[in-house]
Image (spheres, rainbow, N blue to C red):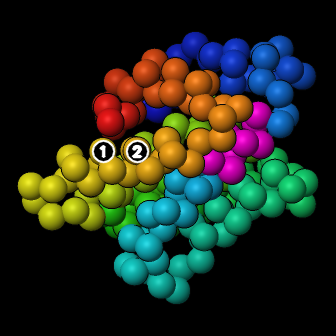
Amino acid sequence: MILPKVRDPRFVTFRRGGTLTDADHHLLALWAASCAEHVLVHFESARPADPRPRQAIEHARAWVRGEVRMMTARAVGGHAMGAARDLQGAARYAAYAAGQAAVVAHVAAHELGAAAYAIKAARAAATDGHRETAGRLECQWQRDQLQEKIRELVLDDQRLRNDLCWSVFAC
């Protein structure tokens, strides 16, 4: 499970009783899409003819631009995660990262799902003895992509949910 049992109001939009602004929700979605896209090569090299994970990343960004509705982005995210079902390793995790990125439109807290699965993909793609280093490098790359406006929010979320996310955020 990647999501906490009790929802953090910082990841719930104002209109649903939380404190998250639409602008920050969009930044979280864009960051998640970048995290997923960074490792997408692992999926696309295994399944070059399957567009579902790339479409999920594109839909996350299209949702931010107001071009698709939340329900559409969420559905496409589910299809991307479906692409992972019969795969293993880096390809599987990359597809999950893309799916999680798209569902940020529905629940902002999925932003860590995209990031965590991307780190798992980087680890799985590395050779034995280099997996931890690859994961730390991916985690640091992700942190370097954070917009200043959401940086502290995401870093605190990583600290709070690291155990739920396979302890991948110790970088």
SS type, badge 1:
helix
Q: Quadrant of residue 164?
A: top left
Residue 150 location (% of width, % of height): 66, 32
Q: Which residue is labeled 2 in the image? A: 140
Q: Position of residue 143 (x, y in %)?
A: 49, 41
Tell me if residue 128 comes above or below residue 5 in the rendering: below
| Real-space CA distance between mark 1 and mark 2, rounded to the nearest whole angstrom | 6 Å
Q: Quadrant of residue 163?
A: top left
Q: Which residue is mark 1?
A: 136
- Tell whether 70 sits left or right of 39: right
Residue located farthest toward the left when viewing the structure as drawn: 129
108 sits left or right of 169 in the view: right
Q: Is residue 68 above or below residue 132?
A: below
**Residue located at (38% from left, 51% from top):** 138
**Residue 76: percent from the left, percent from the top?**
68, 60
**Residue at x-position 86% and y-position 56%:** 65
What quarter of the picture does the N terminus occupy? top left
Q: What amino acid type is highlighted by mark number 1?
A: Arg
Q: Quadrant of the C terminus?
A: top left
Residue that protrudes farthest toward the bottom in the picture: 49
Task: Look at the image and give the residue range highlighted in magenta.
Answer: 24-31
Residue 160, placed above or below residue 171? above
Is residue 162 visible to us here?
A: yes
